Image (cartoon, grey):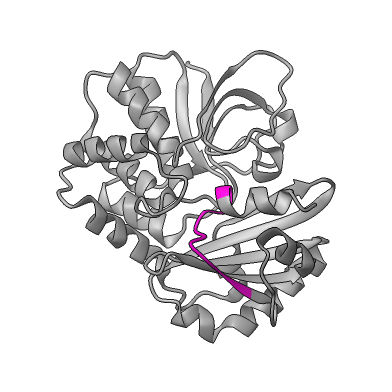
Amino acid sequence: MSEEVYIIGHMNPDTDSICSAIAYAEFKKQAGFSGNYIAARIGELNPETAYVLNRFGFREPVLLEDGAGKKIILVDHNEESQSIEGYSEAEIVEVIDHHKINFRCSKPIFYHNEPLGSTATILGEMFLSRTERIDKGVAGILLSAILSDTVVFKSVTTTDRDIEVANKMAEIAGIDDVKSFGIEVKKAKSSLKGLSAKDVIFSDFKDFDFNGRKVGIGQIEVVDSREAVDRRMEFIDELEKIRLEGDYDLVVLMVTNIMEEGSDLMVAGLTERIEKAFKAKVENNRVYLKDVMSRKKQVVPQLEGVF
């Protein structure tokens, strides 16, 4: 029986994490790698990802709650703080990622990291260069992941390669209007109706260690900011609860409007670090940042630099 290798994205998985895990498992099979590669998740799907998987006929990956004693491939992340329980007792055998590197390993492994808008772009290029054909459904989820992570090519993280791979995947998947499809994907996640403040904040939330300071940053993407504006005090109160319960120095919720191309930051904790990082006044625990859409490139490095 082939040895099981689990492919996982980060906690609070987004579309790139889930779709990259599924696609990489398929790539391993098509490219003839030995082993039983299993796409897995370490959290619940958000509405956008559920929509994408249903749209292209995929089941959600299996839930993996503990990595201890298992062989693991990390996609769309490399930091232990964003990964699975039992990470230190797991055997990490590969990493495919597009984020800053904060990774240590006791032996040589395959590590592929590039400053692209999406992990799915890397995988799309792997399929194009090393496989004879790409399944229509796989192309569809890779396209969706690229559009999701690049915010339909509006994020500053977007590169020409992201756009090129997305267009090739769209052709294979039979998607004629890439940008309209991207908006369709983003709308699936944009409604906050029926979600608690805590659910909204943790729908895409990452922990960071900035020089010994614990910082949590959540992000939601909307096409209409009115829902979030109406619930602003509810979100701020919940951020303060999370800060106290989790012993955070700073907790942030980015409400990114993909149509207006800007983000409303709601904050609890060391708000003066927000002011210093973005040279903007925080009033009533919030500040609006025009043209800021990327947590990875426009918020994390700036905050890390002031800690």
What x and y, as percent, mark residue 160? 35, 37
Residue 186, by quadrant, is bottom left
Name the residue rendered at 30%, 61% in the picture. Answer: 183
> Is 80 drawn above or below residue 294 in the view shown?
above
> Is 280 drawn above or below residue 115 in the view shown?
below
Looking at this rendering, what residue extends furthest in the bottom direction?
230
What x and y, as percent, mark residue 216? 70, 58
Name the residue rendered at 34%, 66% in the picture. Answer: 187
Looking at this rendering, what residue extends furthest in the front direction?
279
- Is residue 238 inside the magenta stretch? no
Query: Horizontal placement of 118 versus 69: left or right?
Result: left
In front here: 254 or 5?
A: 254
Residue stretch rendered in magenta on the structure: 287-297
What x and y, as percent, mark residue 37? 46, 26
> Is 72 drawn above or below residue 219 in the view shown?
above
> Is 98 drawn above or below residue 234 in the view shown?
above
Query: Horizontal placement of 59 versus 225: left or right?
Result: left
Name the residue rendered at 63%, 25% in the picture. Answer: 92
Name the residue rendered at 27%, 37% in the picture. Answer: 139
In front here: 167 or 304?
A: 304
One can see residue 229 in this view: yes
In front here: 158 or 27?
A: 158
- Is residue 289 inside the magenta stretch? yes
What x and y, as percent, mark residue 106? 74, 17
In front here: 41 or 227?
A: 227
One can see residue 256 in this view: no
Query: Horizontal placement of 51 versus 243: left or right?
Result: left
